[in-house]
């Protein structure tokens, strides 16, 4: 029997918080049902499982190596499915139209982190009150450090990009320690990049501003492609924008 794997990884939270555990994986069938529900609400046609699996395989490609495809009974039929991480589910969800995508990503984000239920400290207890004050002070210190990172030209990025040349999407996400699915959503929302013909392209105004360079090439199958890569200037610029975006989301 194929089992869905769950992770007990918890987000950091104050000491006076209680955690609810959440699953960190979802089957492609569950994801399809979630997307179809959003499609129905948006007045869009629903997707059959074979169509959906093709989209999953096209989007994730090499990431599915080592991921077992298995079959599960649905209304008496054996239906193919994959177990996907929530990051992978978000990447697949990014292929949908804007109205469907927002609904799907909101639902996935609600599953991504444990709920944190904060209980007020006992302020009649001097020790508890002192601990609560210390935690608040620490949180302010963390927020101040984050504000320093939000400057358009941050030192840690400058150090990496001053002489390293062009960087692809995944290299840039790794450099910024960014979740790939959230970083893609950010690039879409800020109209920095868009998807066309299965490839991610930069908006022309950002190319003109020197934040991207477009490389052309031909695949082994003879397919011509254009690939937008961040320039050192673009990495520095997007690092500041990304840090500010995360601060606003807090």
Image (cartoon, rainbow, N blue to C red):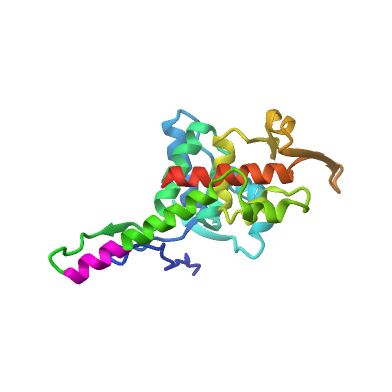
Taking the image as shown, residue 162 lies to the left or right of residue 45, namely: right
By secondary structure, the bulk of the magenta-drawn segment is best described as helix
Q: Quadrant of residue 115?
A: bottom left
Horizontal and vertical percent position of residue 136: 32, 59
Horizontal and vertical percent position of residue 72: 50, 59
Horizontal and vertical percent position of residue 238: 62, 43
Taking the image as shown, residue 18 lies to the left or right of residue 123, namely: right
Using the image as rendered, state which of residue 226 and residue 35 is in the foreground.
226
Q: Is residue 101 above or below residue 146?
A: above
Is 244 contained in the magenta span?
A: no
Is 127 contained in the magenta span?
A: yes
Q: Is residue 35 visible?
A: yes
Using the image as rendered, state which of residue 221 and residue 1 is in the foreground.
221
Horizontal and vertical percent position of residue 198: 69, 39
Q: Quadrant of residue 186?
A: top right
Taking the image as shown, residue 49 lies to the left or right of residue 159, namely: left
Task: Name the residue: 71% across, 32% down.
Answer: 209
Task: Name the residue: 45% across, 49% down.
Answer: 108
Q: How many marks?
A: 0
Using the image as rendered, state which of residue 143 and residue 221 is in the foreground.
143
Q: Is residue 236 above or below residue 71?
A: above
Task: Name the residue: 46% across, 60% down.
Answer: 24
Furthest residue in direction left, as rendered:
124
Using the image as rendered, state which of residue 78 and residue 173 is in the foreground.
173
Task: Name the residue: 66% across, 51% down.
Answer: 172
Q: Is residue 34 visible?
A: no
- Per the rendered image, the range of residues in magenta is 126-134
């Amino acid at each position: 029997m194929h089992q869905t794997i769950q992770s007990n990884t918890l987000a950091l939270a104050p000491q006076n918080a209680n955690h609810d555990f959440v699953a960190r994986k979802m089957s492609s069938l569950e994801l399809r049902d979630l997307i179809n529900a959003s499609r129905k609400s948006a007045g869009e046609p629903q997707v059959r499982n074979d169509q959906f699996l093709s989209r999953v395989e096209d989007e994730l490609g090499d990431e599915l190596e080592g991921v077992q495809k298995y079959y599960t009974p649905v209304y008496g039929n054996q239906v193919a499915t994959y177990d996907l991480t929530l990051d992978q589910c978000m990447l697949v969800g990014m292929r949908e139209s804007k109205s469907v995508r927002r609904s799907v990503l909101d639902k996935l984000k609600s599953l991504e982190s444990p709920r944190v239920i904060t209980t007020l400290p006992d302020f009649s207890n001097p020790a508890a009150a002192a601990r609560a004050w210390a935690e608040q002070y620490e949180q302010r210190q963390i927020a101040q450090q984050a504000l320093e990172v939000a400057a358009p030209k941050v030192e840690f990025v400058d150090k990496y990009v001053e002489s390293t040349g062009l960087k692809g999407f995944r290299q840039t996400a790794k450099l910024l320690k960014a979740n790939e699915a959230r970083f893609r959503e950010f690039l879409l929302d800020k109209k920095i990049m868009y998807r066309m013909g299965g490839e991610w392209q930069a908006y022309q105004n950002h190319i003109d501003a020197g934040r991207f360079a477009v490389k052309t090439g031909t695949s082994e199958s003879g397919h011509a492609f254009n690939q937008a890569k961040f320039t050192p200037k673009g990495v520095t610029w997007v690092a500041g924008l990304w840090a500010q975006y995360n601060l606003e989301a807090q």
